[in-house]
Amino acid sequence: MRYVSTRDKNIWVDDAQGILQGISKEGGLFVPSSFPEIEDLGSLLDMTYGQVALYTLEKFFPGLGHENLVQAVNKAYDSKFSTEEIVAIKDVKGVSFLELYHGPTLAFKDMALSILPHLIGLAKNKLEIKEDIVILTATSGDTGKAALEGFANVEGIKIIVFYPEEGVSKIQKLQMTSQEGDNTLVLGIRGNFDHAQSGVKEIFNNKEFIEELEKNNYILSSANSINIGRLVPQIAYYLYTYIQMVKGEEIVLGDKINIVVPTGNFGNILAAYYGKVMGLPVNKLICGSNDNKVLTEFFNEGKYDINKDLILTSSPSMDILISSNLERLLFHINNGNHELVKEKMGDLRTKAYYEISDLKGEDFYANYANEEEVTKAIREMFKENYLMDSHTAVAYSVYKKYKEESKDTTKTVIVSTASPFKFGDKVASSIGIEIKDMDEFKILDEISYASNLKVPENIKALKEKEIRHKKIIGKEDMERSIREFLQVGEAND
Ligand SMILES: *Cc1c(COP(=O)(O)O)cnc(C)c1O
């Protein structure tokens, strides 16, 4: 299948190359040149999660081969997930919470990052690439750990993760800095996620450096949601959830549903949009933001304005101003007008601002939730015996606003993106636990006691782990650190 660049659709790659390359040479993102269709949604009714994932992957990556994809799916969605169904759907007060956090790192990033290493491996074989692959990843907290977990000790691959030193939760930081595996490097960046992400993008656009790496037998790739191999596996859980709702008789086949997504880099909600374009019956895609509400402004006012400071919130994985995957949406809703995308992305780079006169964003509703609303949402649902993390609480608050404004009674799925135990401080203080001077692990015990939920084993185990990655660098030192790790060129000049 062909993938074209959002900034020049005359540039195209096949599925294997798209996955391996991550980003197009002129800075655009790869998008499918046309969308596959779901011919018969009913045929998915008896499928397991793995089978739906396979169904989705085969539509987008036929070039990787059926048998190969079967194996990749089997290796990805196995007992490293704590629930046999891979995802869990919980109905609370008439709304379905789609819990995507039962993977090894307890955030939804596991859904895609447990399979991405296998897709990259298949792409590498197909293209007969002998060089080592170096995965560069900027993380707002959850991608980093999920990618490290997926790629650690994979032969022929090295992984380097950059996280914003001040912008992640304590548990997220511990998860990353305690990472084992000789092929892993984790570095804190002085600055925020946007600094880390733009630093990684600059490296991808640095031709000389890339050529030098290639001379040393290294090829760069990305585990961020700019990689199409990250995005496609995420479509599967929307299809799967829909059919579970049909089976649970909450809807009948063909009924539309709303999907609410707590959004940062616009990857997760874009996967839901892709599902809709393929024929999944979706009414509104509801985009929830925290105090960094650039996307709310975008959908409601038609302007994208990042002339402001990034605010650090209790939902750090959404503390993002430059929402990368919005570029893909711009391309699609403007019928592949790559000139327009290129112009707007140019404006964003030079003026930190762009405007769209005729947005065509009818598929979406967007709003945001501030800290107080997040606290209230966690507390309110806790009273219903349901514990949400701070990101999911943003989505829930925004859904309440939507419902109030629209009076829409369409069945709704709220995407629950992380375990509440990953964001203990906010969760504990919201449900009335006095956390002042309390050690992080004690906080988690208190949450466990109050909620009757167990602290996940992978989080408990962090307490005893050695910190292996202590280095904090400036954005300007990213290239040098990569050189040091890979032992390429003049690392020490
Ligand atoms: C990454 C992340 C998000 C945001 O997802 P995007 O695909 O970047 O929009 C939301 N919640 C959690 C817990 C995350 O880790």
Image (cartoon, rainbow, N blue to C red):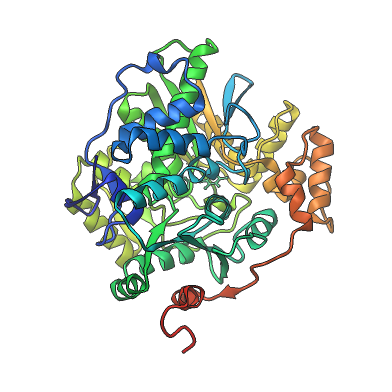
Looking at the picture, tell me which residue is in the foreground, 223 or 264. 223
Q: Is residue 373 above or below residue 425?
A: above
What residue is rendered at 31% in x and 30% in y? 277
Q: Is residue 120 above or below residue 395?
A: below
Asked where in the image residue 342 lies, by quadrant, the reply is bottom left
Q: Residue furthest left?
A: 10
User: Is residue 327 visible to us here?
Assistant: no
What residue is rendered at 45% in x and 76% in y? 483
- Percent coordinates x, y for residue 218 in the rendering: 38, 67
Asked where in the image residue 456 lies, by quadrant, the reply is top right
What residue is rendered at 55% in x and 75% in y? 473
Q: How many marks?
A: 0
Looking at the picture, tell me which residue is in the foreground, 17 or 254. 17
- Percent coordinates x, y for residue 330 in the rendering: 28, 45
Q: Is residue 429 above or below residue 243?
A: below
- Percent coordinates x, y for residue 302 in the rendering: 32, 46
- Percent coordinates x, y for residue 472 in the rendering: 60, 73
User: Is residue 236 visible to us here?
Assistant: yes
Task: Say whether residue 299 is left or right of residue 465.
Answer: left
Q: Classify the position of the N terminus by image quarter.
A: top left
